[in-house]
Amino acid sequence: MVGIVIVSHSKNVAEGVRDLAHQMAGEHKAIIACGGMEDGSIGTDTIRIMEAIKEANDGDGVLVLCDLGSAILSTQTAMDLLEEPIKVVIADAPILEGAVSCAITASFGAPLDDVVQTAEKARGMSKFGR
C-alpha cells in the first residue's frame, strides 16, 4: 500500500492531519506525521523526514504532503539522503484535503500515480460545490 508522510512545520498540525486521514481511510496504517523539530519547536527536520519516508514505505512508494515551501526543500533533501531506492513523490496539494483524499485512495490499494493524482485534484476542490 502507498505510504503517506505529512510534513508540517508544526507537530500538532501534522498529527491532526494524520489523525483525520486515519479516521477517514480506515485500515490505512502507513500515514506518518512528521511535524516540527525534535525539541518541539516550529520547523522541519530533514533527517526526521527521511526516517518517516522509510517508515511509510512498504514497497509501493510514498507520497509526501508539505505545508510550506521550506518543508518541500527539507523533503527534497531527505529524498536525496535516502540510501535505499524508494519511489517518493511530493504532491502539489493542500495538506489537509490532499491527505484525506489520497489516504482513502491508498487504502483501496491504488498505485502511487493514482494516489498522487487524487491528492492533487484536491487543489481545485470547491467547498461550496460551485
Image (spheres, rainbow, N blue to C red):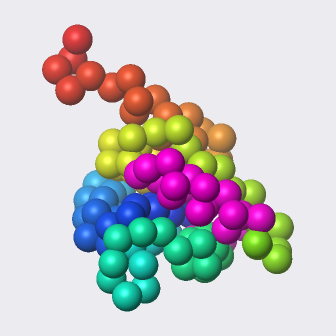
Left/right of residue 13 with respect to residue 6 in the rendered view: left
User: With respect to residue 27, does 117 lie above or below?
Assistant: above
Residue at horizontal 50 percent and vertical 48 percent from the top: 69
**Corner quadrant of residue 37:** bottom left
Residue at horizontal 32 percent and vertical 48 percent from the top: 96
Residue at horizontal 33 percent and vertical 26 percent from the top: 125
**Corner quadrant of residue 128:** top left
Q: Is residue 28 visible?
A: no
Residue at horizontal 69 percent and vertical 64 percent from the top: 77
Residue 36 inside the magenta-drawn segment: no
What residue occupies the far bottom of the structure in this picture? 39
Image coords of residue 120 (percent x, y): 50, 34
Image coords of residue 72 (percent x, y): 56, 53
Point out the stretch of residues depicted in magenta: 56-80
Image coords of residue 121 (percent x, y): 46, 29
Q: The C terminus lies in which quarter of the figure?
A: top left
What residue occupies the far top of the structure in this picture? 130
Image coords of residue 101 (percent x, y): 39, 43
Residue 70 inside the magenta-drawn segment: yes
User: With respect to residue 91, does 34 lie above or below?
Assistant: below
What residue occupies the far left of the structure in this picture? 128
Q: How many marks?
A: 0
Left/right of residue 39 with respect to residue 24 in the rendered view: right
Q: Is residue 125 visible?
A: yes
**Corner quadrant of residue 8:** bottom left
Q: Nearer the viewer, residue 33 or 20?
A: 33
User: With respect to residue 20, does 93 lie above or below?
Assistant: above
Q: The N terminus lies in which quarter of the figure?
A: bottom right
Q: Nearer the viewer, residue 85 or 113?
A: 85
